[in-house]
Amino acid sequence: MSAPSPSSPHYRRIAEMLRLTLTSGALRAGDRMISARKLAEREHVSLPTALEALRCLEAEGLLVARPRSGYYIRQTSLPPSVETSRSPPGPVPVTLSAVARSLFSSAEARLVPLGAALPDPTWLPGDALQRALHSASRRLDAHGQSYSLPPGRVDLRTRIAARSAQWGARFGADDLIITAGATQALRLALRAVCQPGDVVAIEQPAYFGTLLLLEDLGLKALAIPTDPVEGLLLEPLADAIRCHRPAAVLASPTVQNPLGASMPVARKQELVALLEEAEIPLIEDDVYGDLVGDGQRPPACKAFDQSGNVIYCSSLSKTLAPGWRIGWIAPGRYHLQVLQARMAGDWAGAPLLEAAASEMLASGDYDRHLRRLKRRVAQGVLAVVARVEASFPPGTRVSVPAAGFLLWVELPQQVNALEVHRRALALGIGVSPGPLFSPAAGLTHFLRLNCANEPTPRLLNAVEQIGALCHELAVFTPDSPATR
């Protein structure tokens, strides 16, 4: 690994020095890392600079943050990490709907929820949500049953803009449009900058909702290799831009779904600069960003956007209230196109839910909930990883996220993930098979597991049952009837 240049930012130089210390074996798994304050004193830098260096290593999966305790060396007894993805050459049409229909047909069944990427309903702040709804209902009176017209309630947009300013975003309330969740925000972004038949560069593997949107809008997917720790790889992206000139890049630089990868801050800056120079818009899906960090979250790509080329999309669906469908988009220089698309489609919002969401953000209830949620997520991830390690067949590899609650599991190659999914359904267990996350045939021996659930005996037993299914399928030969 090459040393950073003398012109590198201080935090990056410090992070590289700490990384060399970790890889040298001088510290063991479980050891406590130097505190940010002592690191700042030792390196003669500010406390925020020292914190940024430690957060870089956390994003790479080398450190884990413990609330009110500090940073620790991540345990190495976990299954080995998944390798960087390989992508099919060139743009391809997306044909995912048939697979998705077969999976969603059982969505109403009471399954052990290892499939859908949603937090445990018992982890949501039910009392606080009800208080916010009642308060908003009294305040709005009959107007709460009307429409919320685009761009959405100004009080909610003001609260979102204020929160985003904490991590460096450069947008205000007037730059935001409220949407029915992040999925609608992504749809609006794609409609604003793409025409049917255009090519969109995406991560490989990619969130299946992204693939469904591309298929529905008649767009082609250009899959870019993605590292399970550092996220979207910039060199293959630059090559793809030269060869195929995509109309847009759609990515989740912070807590990517399904890998859980987060790009280091410096590489986010490089991504923004690369696409600005190429005059290709970046559609940033940041629905998991609030789950990162113990305190102030790291910046999104939007924080480095000087020209409005980044279209920022997010929501409260993964952290607060999935059913409220509160999302938003900061379209930058594409604001007019996105607003027109919002008004031409499903344009009416729900004023009562928007007002209640605004109250949750203003009261501090959301931040208190986030602190509890992140602790629970960390415990859930460790519990599921330990059970995977104990129950899955030899050769299984796991991408353990530094933040977020998704686990990406690579099975032995002879294990067909769709068959695992089918047999798991018969046992009352939901899992998400790898083919759901690829625009082309592939990822057939991968699974995504949701760890945002209370690690009850029932849930952990379900993980063991999935492991047993994988053991069973791993021993079949290619000529076995079960694999034809």
Image (spheres, rainbow, N blue to C red):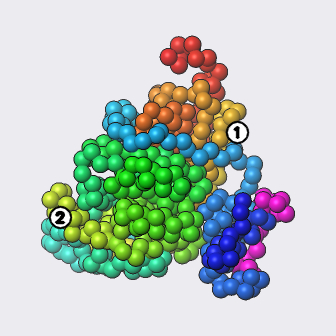
Q: At 74% across and 79% down in the image, what residue appears?
A: 39
Labels in figure, total? 2
Q: Viewer-nearest of labels 2 and 1?
A: 2
Magenta region: which residues?
22-39
**Residue 26 is a magenta residue:** yes
**Residue 468 is a magenta residue:** no
Query: Could you tell me if residue 257 is visible in this image?
Result: no
Left or right, 413 with respect to 219, comes to right
- Label 2: element kind: helix
From this viewpoint, which residue is outermost toward the right?
Answer: 26
The main secondary structure of the magenta stretch is loop
What residue is pinned by disc 1?
390
Q: Amino acid at mark 1?
A: Ala
Name the one closer to the observer, 19 or 244: 244
Q: At 71% across and 48% down in the image, what residue appears?
A: 78
Q: Residues within 10 Å of mark 2 (few under 14, many from 20)?
A: some
- Label 1: element kind: helix
Q: Amino acid at mark 2?
A: Gln
What residue is pinned by disc 2?
340
Q: Position of residue 29 (x, y in %)?
A: 78, 58
Q: Position of residue 286 (x, y in %)?
A: 43, 62
Left or right, 148 with respect to 438, comes to left
Name the one closer to the observer, 55 or 325: 55
